[in-house]
């Protein structure tokens, strides 16, 4: 299937639905040696399902900070260090660019080696390392698979009956990739996590109020990157970056000269999703003293703990 044919169904995340996806995911995990967990580099905390983390990371895991081309480069580097750990490597990725396949395979081979050794210790033959790509909706799983597999063999979106239909694609003489991704349901137990996921469109546009999400996005960006939105919308000196002021600056008006807030909210969300106001990360990792500053605002929210172990070799 070509990417242009792709229709990604919007999933409404009811509790029953979440349970179904969780079950499917645990079935898939039984079939693999290594998990490639795709996160959105702009949301390295909210795009993790912390409840499922233990199950997923029972397996050696390669964390892909995907869409790194849209995220703040200084934050990308910090998160890459902060998230690494034992049996857990981290890579920055731009699945649309897709140039880092060799590096990805190298990590997978290293992470899968223990499973192969275990197999051989039981007297069985060495076989290719088996890998599953998993992640929340819209983080770029299918784009990543397509970029690795080439020839756009994989289907984008979510498939029913995944286990029965499982197919493996040999992406290296010693690595086999499951051709369809595992969907990790979003963890929506706080309003903030839901709102953050909505800003990058990970929970389906129908599920949220665009004006509310846009206001939340403005507040978050302005706290982390003061002045950036005001500059982007060419607001005048002293004008606060509100949805109303942005509408007026763009001349988005309804009849009676009222600001068109919905149009402004939609424009802001679309433009943010394409990093037009700049490369922005909405959850910041802590600054370590030796690192050069990015020149951007220092982190203030949802801070990551300092890494307790040396980062994996990248
Ligand atoms: P999923 O399987 O995890 O649900 O995600 P999928 O691959 O369908 O990707 C979701 C959207 O994210 C797609 O955009 C895709 O092109 C984009 N994307 C994936 N990886 C990257 C990346 O590393 N960088 C950037 N900038 N974008 C990425 P779309 O809106 O569906 O289409 P389009 O914008 O490509 O036309």
Image (cartoon, rainbow, N blue to C red):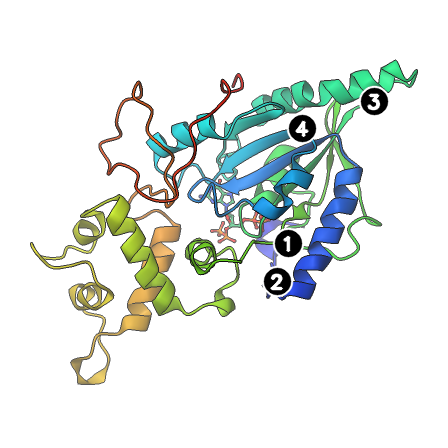
Q: CA distance from mark 4 to mark 1?
A: 25 Å
Residue found 68% across the figure and 63% down from its top: 17
The tag earlier along the polypeptide, 4 or 3, is 4
- Which quarter of the picture shows residue 102? top right
The tag earlier along the polypeptide, 1 or 3, is 3
Instruction: Read off the residue under disc 1.
Output: 157
Q: Is mark 1 within 8 Å of ligand 1?
A: yes
> Mark 4 Cα within 10 Å, few/some/many (few <14, many 20+)?
many
Which labelled disc corresponds to residue 60?
Answer: 4
Q: Where residue 129 sits in the image (x, y, percent)? A: 76, 25
Can residue 100 be seen?
no
Can residue 48 be seen?
yes
Q: CA distance from mark 4 to mark 3?
A: 17 Å
Which labelled disc corresponds to residue 9?
Answer: 2
- Closer to us: 109 or 222: 222
Instruction: Read off the residue under disc 3.
Output: 127
In this rendering, the label closer to the viewer, 2 or 4: 4
Residue found 66% across the figure and 18% down from its top: 110
- Closer to us: 172 or 45: 45
Residue found 36% across the figure and 33% down from its top: 75
């Amino acid at each position: 299937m070509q990417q242009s044919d792709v229709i990604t169904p919007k999933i409404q995340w009811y509790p029953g639905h979440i349970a179904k996806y969780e079950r499917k995911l645990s079935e898939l995990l039984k079939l693999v040696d290594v998990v490639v967990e795709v996160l959105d580099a702009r949301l390295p905390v909210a795009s993790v399902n912390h409840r499922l983390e233990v199950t997923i990371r029972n397996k050696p895991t390669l964390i892909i900070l995907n869409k790194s081309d849209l995220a703040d480069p200084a934050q990308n580097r910090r998160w890459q260090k902060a998230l690494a750990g034992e049996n857990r490597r981290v890579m920055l990725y731009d699945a649309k660019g897709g140039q880092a396949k060799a590096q990805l395979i190298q990590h997978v081979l290293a992470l899968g080696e223990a499973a192969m050794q275990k197999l051989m210790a039981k007297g069985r033959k060495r076989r290719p390392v088996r890998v599953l790509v998993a992640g929340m909706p819209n983080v770029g799983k299918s784009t990543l698979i397509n970029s690795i597999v080439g020839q756009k063999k994989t289907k984008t979106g979510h498939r029913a009956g995944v286990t029965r239909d499982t197919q493996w694609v040999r992406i290296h003489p010693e690595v086999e990739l499951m051709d369809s991704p595992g969907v990790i349901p979003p963890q929506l137990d706080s309003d903030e996590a839901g709102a953050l996921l909505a800003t990058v469109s990970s929970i389906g546009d129908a599920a949220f109020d665009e004006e509310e999400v846009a206001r939340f996005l403005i507040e978050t960006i302005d706290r982390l990157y003061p002045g950036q939105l005001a500059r982007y919308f060419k607001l005048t000196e002293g004008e606060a970056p509100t949805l109303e002021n942005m509408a007026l600056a763009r001349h988005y008006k309804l009849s009676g000269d009222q600001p068109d807030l919905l149009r402004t909210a939609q424009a802001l969300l679309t433009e943010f999703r394409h990093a037009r106001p700049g490369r922005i990360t909405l959850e910041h990792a802590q600054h370590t003293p030796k690192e050069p500053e990015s020149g951007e605002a220092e982190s203030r929210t949802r801070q990551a703990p300092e890494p307790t172990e040396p980062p994996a070799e990248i």
